[in-house]
Image (cartoon, grey):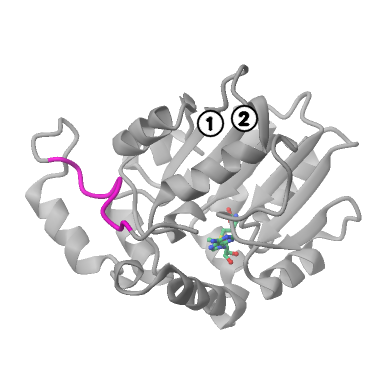
Amino acid sequence: MPTQSPSSSRTPTPGHPKSPRPSARLFRRLVESKLIGRLSYEDYREKVRAAYSGPKGALLVASSFISLHAPLGERLFHSQKFNLSGVRNVLDVGCGAGQIVKHLLKHGDPEIRVTCVDISTQMLRRARQRIHDQRPTWATADVTQLPFADESFDAVTCGYVLEHLPDIRDGLGELSRVLVPGGRMLLLITEDNFFGSWNSRLWHCRTHNRHELRETCQQLGLIWKQELWFTKMHEMFKAGGICVEVQKPAGKSG
Ligand SMILES: C[S@@+](CC[C@H](N)C(=O)[O-])C[C@H]1O[C@@H](n2cnc3c(N)ncnc32)[C@H](O)[C@@H]1O
């Protein structure tokens, strides 16, 4: 059960070398959604589920194209920035309309097994209608309580989901649990900047600071392997959020 700690990994310590400027902090305070800090996790999760199951979720594919995440996200796999070679069994958490699933099926091994999870059964239905491929399996579940045994997958992808948790450690810990030692995760997470603040307002999610997220991963024993960008422009404007490959150490179980 996720703990309610909306401030963890959110407010950079004053004096932290990467603390945002006061004007940026004010902007975020004005724009970002505060919903996650106001409700219990169960109530908040119901709101998130309802938002994605409803008309806003039906427009998710369109908004992924407008934000360029859907067309440009493919580059991560096509260019092997996130290398799928040798990956046989992958879990995509918060699959939404199947934006990442499509890339996994296209660029992964032809025999790749893809398991797709989402809290919204309606989103899973939309993904199945879009994907037209018999290979994926589908399950309704929460990222903090995955219905899989320890060390079930050799890779995990999770795009724009962990920002829907009061404490990101609950999700990261669970993703790590189902990953084999040495397995890799691709995480996309809303960042605490201009673009992220609007995303937070639109989807009632949190934003994360990449330096603090890196520290959190290290505290959980996860290796921060590489930060990725869809394009040079994304890197220049810090758009597209935090996109990072994280690895579970080879010797680490659970
Ligand atoms: C912004 S969409 C991302 C879709 C896709 N992964 C992508 O990268 O475009 C977020 C998805 O995460 C799902 N989601 C939100 N909270 C979740 C949770 N606690 N557990 C599992 N899925 C969740 C939502 O239902 C939604 O489909």
Q: Residues within 10 Å of mark 2 (few under 14, many from 20)?
A: many
Mark 2 C-beta to ligand 1 under 8 Å? no
Q: Amino acid at mark 1?
A: Glu
Location of mark 2 (residue): 184
Image x and y of residue 221, in percent: 46, 26
Q: Main secondary structure of the magenta part?
A: loop
Q: Quadrant of ligand 1?
A: bottom right
Image height of 157 relative to 55, above or below: above
How many numbered badges does the structure rendering display? Answer: 2
Mark 1 C-beta to ligand 1 under 8 Å? no
Give the label on residue 245, or none: 1
Image height of 23 relative to 88, above or below: below
Give the label on residue 176, or none: none
User: As rendered, which of 239 and 120 lies closer to the eye?
Assistant: 120
Q: Which residues are magenta?
A: 5-13
Image x and y of residue 95, in percent: 65, 57
Mark 2 and 1 residues: CB-CB less than 8 Å, in contact?
yes
Image x and y of residue 150, in percent: 69, 38
